[in-house]
Amino acid sequence: MNQSASTYRITDLAESERPRERLENHGASHLSNAELLAILLRVGVQGENAVQVGHRLLNTFGGLAGLHKASFSELTGQHGIGAAKAAQLKAALELGHRMLDATPEERPVVHSPEDAAELVRYEMSALEQEELRVILLDTRNRVLSLETIYRGSLNSSQIRVGELFKTAIRRNAATVIVIHNHPSGDPTPSPDDVAVTRAIVQAGKLLDVDVLDRAPCKGAAVVL
């Protein structure tokens, strides 16, 4: 059997099962992640159609967040994923991320630590080193901005708490949420996390800026 005969295309699927037709008839929101990936991939490989390749990628890398985190070489190391397809996947994921940043008038509202973690989990889960970020909120808990304060190991002796509140005071923020990631994936707060949190809360009281309660969240992001 030659390669062209053994390569599975979307058109090999029944028309009712083709992702592009389903998207056209029902909208993108009705498609699974694997089906959306299949539209980008266009063709499968021997023994797998494009949807099955999409499922394999999601399983291999642990979902869309894992695909975002995967390096270009890790993607091209997958069977059936060449440089062109890897570039298409990376570009699509980045466009989705940039779309969120392109609508500042639709500011999200934070009601819980999980809401705060969701704002940064996609991007911070891909980081290979620790970062500490501050989310600034107005009096209605709407996001004013998100600032990166530190990069590198989070050590209580190295954190200048005043630096965390500089932008908060300038933007007249009512509340701050401090978030950092654990590249290991374990969200359990370390002793340094707890020490830094206490110092931040105390400083916030002096400056009349609320610091929301700390709580560990699922994934790599940790809300202090």
Image (cartoon, rainbow, N blue to C red):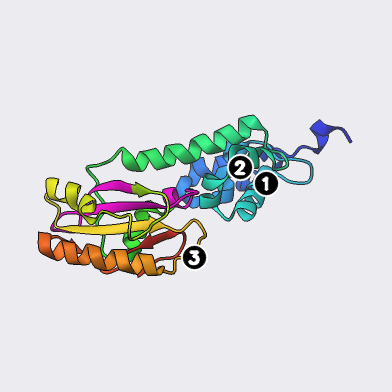
For the residue carrying disc 1, how many other residues have a C-alpha within 10 Å: few (<14), some (14-19), or many (20+)? many
Q: Nearer the viewer, mark 3 or mark 1?
A: 3
Disc 2 is placed on an element classified as helix
N-terminal-most mark, 3 or 1: 1
The disc at residue 186 is 3
Q: Nearer the viewer, residue 96 or 17?
A: 96
Q: Quadrant of the C terminus?
A: bottom left
Res. 38 mark: 2
The magenta segment is 122-149
Query: Label 2, label 3: how many angstroms apart (C-alpha)?
Result: 32 Å
**Inter-mark Cα distance, 3 to 1:** 30 Å
- The answer to whether residue 187 is left or right of residue 54 is left
Q: Position of residue 90 (x, y in %)?
A: 53, 37
Say whether marks 3 and 1 touch (CB < 8 Å): no
The answer to the question of whether label 2 and label 3 lie on touching residues, with beta carbons closer than 8 A, is: no
Secondary structure of the residue carrying tag 3 is loop
Q: Earlier in the sequence, mark 1 or mark 2?
A: 2
How busy is the neighbourhood of tag 3: few (under 14 within 10 Å), some, or many (20 plus)? some
Q: Is residue 130 magenta?
A: yes
